[in-house]
Image (tube, rainbow, N blue to C red):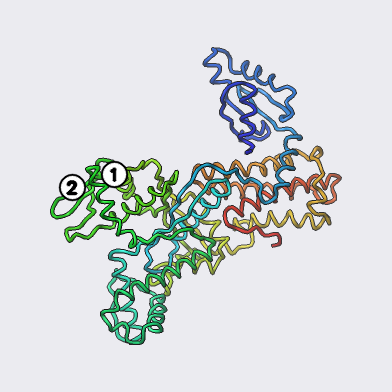
């Protein structure tokens, strides 16, 4: 059970009412506090100080707490050595299963990245990929049943543009012609690589055969998806399902009938519109063009009907911030096809400003006009990229300098945390002890700083739960950085190896190392034992 939940339940069972449980900013006041006396004072028309003092007396003899005190009307709780020791022992026995939640009766479909299969992923895609994957990993660790899905936008004009762009690249690269690319077309060396593969499979003159253009477009799309899947894999991101937009259009007639049954469509100017203004959109949206071809929105409606028909308890989409205006119309469509749009949660991911040595990072020649995700992964490593992208909420602007992530000092947050973890392992080596050598130790002789360190390390389960519920992975990175800062401060201010209570301190630090290792693991990052 999470510590916050456990302590809150115990307090409520004793005072016989629901409470709000907080963590005081000043830990010397206590590990937890509740303002319950203030709400009781309004009901009972008594002084909250007097009520808090009366409540504190109810906890006499409860060995979970070292002390329960009334301070300015707040009821403050300091955890006992016994409780901390029992918690450490349970956690160390759990080892890498520490902080894992019990299975939840909730199935979630999480869709993220879903970039058009027209070129390699750029650094903006990386942010949604890392945020989505961290949310997936933390949620699964907590016991949620989550399916990760990638929606392949392989229908519509972008596929036609991919085919034309590939032909232009082939004329330049294979046939050595002078080519002028329209600005909106795709460019980059990756198209030359695909052109080479087309020639190897279909022959040198394949691009001169008009009857082959559709096949070449499909071939190019599949090759781009192979690039995307590899680049995501290098970043530690793996999907359970890939759903093709093109494959769903066979269900358009059925989906359209569902919309018509709910009176959500009307015709105007030879087009068919969705009445999305009924759910707050600023205008009704076209779902069938005047040429009879369904729009991109129609594809999204089919897809979301398909999602909801699979009967998950919740649906989470992670979109780029430029899709903000799209939210209302998609939620309207979900309602119109007979489902509950409150089950659909849409999270936005802002773009990224990337620097190198204080200057804007150069665009990738291989991709034409963007910064490739794979280039940054290759330069600084997947662990550093994952961590830095999780240090800000996904819907806020992020700017960072990749040179900082190469620094071997405290300016590099990944180094700083790994150094704290490795420092603890070095202390064990210096003491010529292993974790099994200290497992039977108590913590009675540890000073207050050490006990504060233990308490912070035991908070990981609560931090993970809060980060998932609030969809805010920054809470985990902030926690790991703060815990590491406490390790470094404790190391610099206190003697550990050679102290009379060396084994007790090392046991406490083994708990800290476990929290750092598990915390990084659930973010998809491997903790280092040697720096």
Q: Secondary structure at mark 2?
A: strand
Q: Residue furthest top?
A: 45
Q: Secondary structure at mark 1?
A: helix
**Residue 519: image x %, image y %?**
62, 50
Q: Is residue 263 visible?
A: yes
Which quarter of the rendering shows the C terminus?
bottom right
**Residue 504: image x %, image y %?**
80, 44
> Which mark, by number, is residue 191?
none
User: How far apart are labels 1 and 2 at the CA level?
Assistant: 13 Å
Query: Is 81 placed above or below 425 here?
Result: above
> Which mark, by number, is residue 336?
1
Which quarter of the rendering shows the N terminus?
top right
Q: How packed is label 1: few (under 14 Cα within 10 Å), some, or many (20 or more)?
A: many
Viewer-nearest residue: 148 or 419? 148
Query: Is 380 placed above or below 132 here?
Result: below
Viewer-nearest residue: 8 or 419? 8
Q: Quadrant of residue 171?
A: bottom left
Residue in view at x 55 percent, y 20 percent:
38
**Residue 487: image x %, image y %?**
70, 49
Is 426 placed left or right of 391 in the picture? right
**Residue 265: image x %, image y %?**
21, 47
Residue on which the image places disc 2: 266
Residue in view at x 64 percent, y 62 percent:
408
Q: Are marks 1 and 2 in contact (CB under 8 Å)?
A: no
Q: Earlier in the sequence, mark 1 or mark 2?
A: 2
Query: Is 522 placed above or below 504 here?
Result: below
């Amino acid at each position: 059970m999470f510590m916050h939940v456990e302590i809150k339940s115990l307090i409520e069972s004793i005072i016989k009412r629901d409470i709000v449980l907080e963590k005081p900013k000043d830990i010397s006041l206590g590990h937890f506090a509740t303002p319950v006396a203030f709400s009781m004072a309004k009901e009972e028309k008594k002084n909250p100080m007097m009520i808090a003092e009366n409540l504190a007396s109810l906890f006499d003899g409860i060995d979970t707490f070292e002390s329960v005190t009334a301070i300015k009307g707040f009821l403050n709780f300091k955890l006992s050595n016994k409780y901390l020791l029992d918690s450490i022992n349970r956690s160390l026995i759990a080892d890498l299963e520490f902080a894992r939640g019990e299975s939840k009766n909730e199935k979630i479909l999480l869709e993220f990245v879903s970039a058009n299969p027209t070129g390699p992923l750029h650094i903006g895609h990386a942010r949604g990929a890392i945020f989505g994957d961290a949310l997936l990993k933390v949620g699964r660790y907590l016991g949620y049943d989550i399916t990760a899905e990638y929606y392949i936008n392989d229908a519509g004009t972008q596929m036609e543009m991919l085919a034309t762009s590939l032909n232009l690249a082939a004329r330049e690269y294979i046939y050595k012609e002078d080519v002028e690319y329209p600005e909106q077309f795709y460019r980059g060396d990756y198209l030359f690589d695909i052109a080479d593969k087309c020639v190897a499979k279909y022959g040198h003159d394949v691009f001169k055969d008009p009857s082959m253009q559709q096949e070449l477009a499909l071939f190019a799309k599949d090759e781009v998806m192979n690039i995307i899947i590899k680049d995501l894999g290098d970043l530690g991101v793996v999907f359970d399902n890939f759903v093709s937009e093109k494959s769903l259009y066979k269900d358009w007639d059925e989906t359209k009938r569902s919309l018509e049954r709910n009176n959500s469509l009307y015709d105007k100017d030879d087009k068919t519109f969705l009445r999305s203004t009924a759910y707050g959109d600023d205008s009704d949206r076209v779902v069938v063009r005047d040429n009879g071809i369904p729009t991109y929105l129609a594809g999204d409606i089919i897809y979301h009907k398909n999602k909801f028909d699979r009967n998950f308890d919740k649906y989470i989409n992670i979109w780029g911030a430029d899709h903000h205006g799209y939210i209302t119309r998609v939620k309207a469509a979900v309602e119109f096809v007979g489902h509950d749009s409150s089950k659909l949660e849409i999270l936005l991911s802002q773009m990224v400003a990337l620097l190198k040595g204080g200057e804007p990072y150069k665009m990738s020649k291989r991709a034409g006009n963007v910064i490739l995700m794979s280039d940054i992964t290759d330069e600084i490593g997947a662990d550093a990229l994952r961590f830095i992208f999780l240090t800000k909420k996904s819907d806020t602007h992020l700017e960072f300098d990749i040179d900082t992530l190469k620094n071997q000092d405290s300016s590099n947050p990944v180094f700083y945390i790994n150094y704290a973890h490795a420092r603890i392992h070095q202390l064990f080596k210096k003491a010529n002890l292993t974790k099994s050598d200290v497992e039977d130790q108590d913590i009675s002789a540890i000073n207050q700083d050490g006990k504060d360190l233990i308490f912070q390390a035991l908070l990981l389960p609560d931090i993970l739960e809060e980060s998932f519920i609030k969809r805010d992975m920054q809470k985990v990175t902030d926690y790991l950085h703060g815990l590491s800062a406490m390790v470094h401060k404790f190391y610099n201010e206190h003697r550990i190896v050679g102290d009379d209570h060396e084994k007790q301190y090392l046991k406490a630090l083994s708990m800290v190392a476990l929290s750092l290792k598990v915390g990084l693991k659930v973010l998809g990052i491997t903790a280092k034992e040697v720096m």
